[in-house]
Amino acid sequence: MTPVADIERPAVLRTVEPVAPRGQTLQDVLCGVWEDLCAHRTATCPICAGAMSPRYGSGPAAVAGRCEDCETELA
């Protein structure tokens, strides 16, 4: 077993910039994504800011969205 002190650690931790503008709640962000998806528009992924396309079930309404970049699904 390797002692904890011998494990290599990254020199710099990667920081992730928030996708949502300051002042928006999670509810605000998700509602905005759903509004775009339900209007048959591409939305901004709340995780990576990629393009989230609407996904359809057996009817004409969008039932989910899937990001083309990170493959996050909102259902």
Image: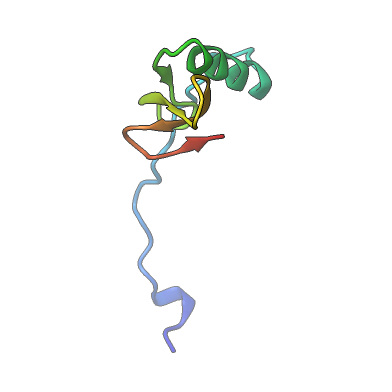
Q: Dividing the picture into quarters, in which one does residue 52 lie?
A: top left
Query: As drawn, is 75 to the left or to the right of 50?
Result: right
Locate residue 70 relative to residue 37 in the image: left or right. left
Q: Residue at x 58, y 19 (%)?
A: 29
Residue at the spot 49% in from the left edge and 13% down from the top edge: 36
Q: Residue at x 48, y 37 (%)?
A: 73
- Position of residue 25 measured from the top left corner of the image (x, y, whole percent): 66, 19
Please state if 22 lies on the left or on the right of 65 as rendered. Answer: right
Residue at image location 49% in from the left, 19% down from the top: 60
User: Closest to the observer: 3 or 69?
Assistant: 69
Query: At which x and y percent is residue 53?
Result: 39, 24
Residue 40 vs 51, above or below: the answer is above
Query: Furthest-bottom residue in view?
Result: 1
Quarter of the image that includes the N terminus? bottom left
Q: How many marks?
A: 0
The type of colouring in the image is rainbow
What percent of the width, then of the height, locates residue 40? 44, 13
Q: Is residue 26 left or right of residue 18?
A: right
Q: Quadrant of the C terminus?
A: top right
